[in-house]
Image (cartoon, rainbow, N blue to C red):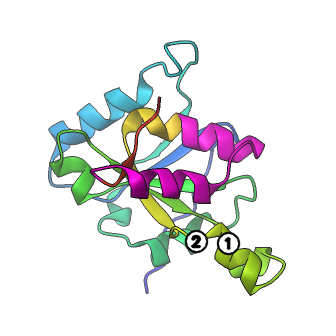
Amino acid sequence: MRTLPAITGRNEFDALVVRTAYDDDRAWQDVRAALLAPWGDGAYEACVHFVDDPAWADAAADEILPAVSADESLAVVFLADRTTMRSVSHPLLAITTLTREECVDDEDYGQLTAFGTEFRTTPAGVHDVHANLSIGNLGFEEYAAWARDDSEGMYRSA
């Protein structure tokens, strides 16, 4: 497994979006524009920290999670992968940073990951997910359940 570069300069209020697909720069610009749009009916400014470095090309979750683990305020990381770039709705892959070691026991970890450790979300959903996980208002498992129940398997911000 390769070692990825450290992520620096992320403000704790910024959603972390890592680009892992580099075959369509136009799609990436569209994803960035969607992520930088105001959210919450336009009431909130988008705060996003982008990692746009080819060193992260084709990185998988098991490579990315150790690289972001030093950031204790980070509950979720979003990947702009091939699926993101190829789909019209640009769904990003949301991955929880929760580890078994952070939980009381296996049962606790099982409950918190009952619907998986990742799900897809529209760009508009990134801010909702990040903000609510950051303040502990909702859990990752709730968003993963909503994504599972969606006809296309993704979380869509209201």
Task: Identify the magenta region.
Answer: 128-152
Is 142 inside the magenta-drawn segment?
A: yes
Q: Is residue 49 above or below residue 80?
A: above
Q: Nearer the viewer, residue 111 or 45?
A: 111
In terms of secondary structure, where does tag 2 sit?
loop
The residue that appears at 60% across and 70% down in the rendered structure is: 113
Residue 147 tag number? none
Seen in the picture, residue 38 relative to 33 is either above or below; the reply is above
Q: What type is the residue that disc 1 sits on?
A: Gln
How crowded pointer 1 is (Cα within 10 Å; few <14, some 14-19, many 20+) is rated as: few
Q: Could you tell whether 26 is left or right of 84 in the image?
A: left
SS type, badge 1: helix
The residue shown at (24%, 39%) is 89
Q: Picture quarter containing residue 76?
A: bottom right
Residue 55 is situated, as x and y percent measured from the top left of the image, at 36, 65
Circle 2 residues within 10 Å: few <14, some 14–19, many ≥20: some
SS majority, magenta: helix
Q: Name the residue under label 2.
A: 114
User: What amino acid is at disc 2?
Assistant: Ala
| Disc 1/disc 2 C-alpha distance (Å) | 5 Å
Residue 111, disc: 1
Q: In which quarter of the image is the N terminus?
A: bottom left
Question: Residue at left 73%, top 85%?
Answer: 106
Tell me: residue 102, above or below residue 13: below
